[in-house]
């Protein structure tokens, strides 16, 4: 019997929070990182942050 190996490409799961205040951004980043996400912070014009968490499913 011959078996075939199929590798599925898994799309990452991305969660994004906007308008995160400076006082909460470190906690939000820490929470996402504790769940295994790669986290990116983007400063907004109004002084708040966008936090993007990418999970490799």
Image: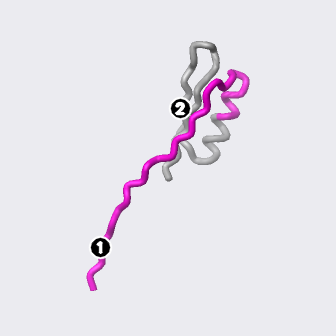
- The residue under the point 61% across, 23% down is 49
- The residue under the point 70% across, 33% down is 27
Q: Is residue 32 magenta?
A: no
Image quarter of residue 26: top right
Residue furthest left in the image: 2
Instruction: Using a 10 Å C-alpha cutoff, classify the residue at mark 2 as few (fewer than 14 neighbours), some (14 to 19) or many (20 or more).
Output: few
- Residue 51: give x, y in percent of width and height: 58, 31
Q: Secondary structure at mark 2?
A: strand
Q: Is residue 20 magenta?
A: yes
Instruction: Using a 10 Å C-alpha cutoff, classify the residue at mark 1 as few (fewer than 14 neighbours), some (14 to 19) or many (20 or more).
Output: few
Q: Classify residue 14 as left or right of residue 19.
A: left
- Residue 50: give x, y in percent of width and height: 58, 26
- The residue under the point 69% across, 22% down is 21
Q: Classify residue 56 as left or right of residue 32.
A: left
Q: Classify residue 32 as left or right of residue 6.
A: right
The label number, if any, that marks residue 40 in the structure image: 2
Query: Mark 2 vs mark 1: which is more N-terminal?
Result: 1
Q: CA distance from mark 2 to mark 1?
A: 38 Å
The label number, if any, that marks residue 4 in the structure image: 1
Residue furthest right in the image: 23
- The residue under the point 68% across, 21% down is 22
- Residue 56: give x, y in percent of width and height: 49, 49
Image quarter of residue 15: top right
Magenta residues, start to end? 1-28
Question: Which quadrant of the figure contains the N terminus?
Answer: bottom left
């Amino acid at each position: 019997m011959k078996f075939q190996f199929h590798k599925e490409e898994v799309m990452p799961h991305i969660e994004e929070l906007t308008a995160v205040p400076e006082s909460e951004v470190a906690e939000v980043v820490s929470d996402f990182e504790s769940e295994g996400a790669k986290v990116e912070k983007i400063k907004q014009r109004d002084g708040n942050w966008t936090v993007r968490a990418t999970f490799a499913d």
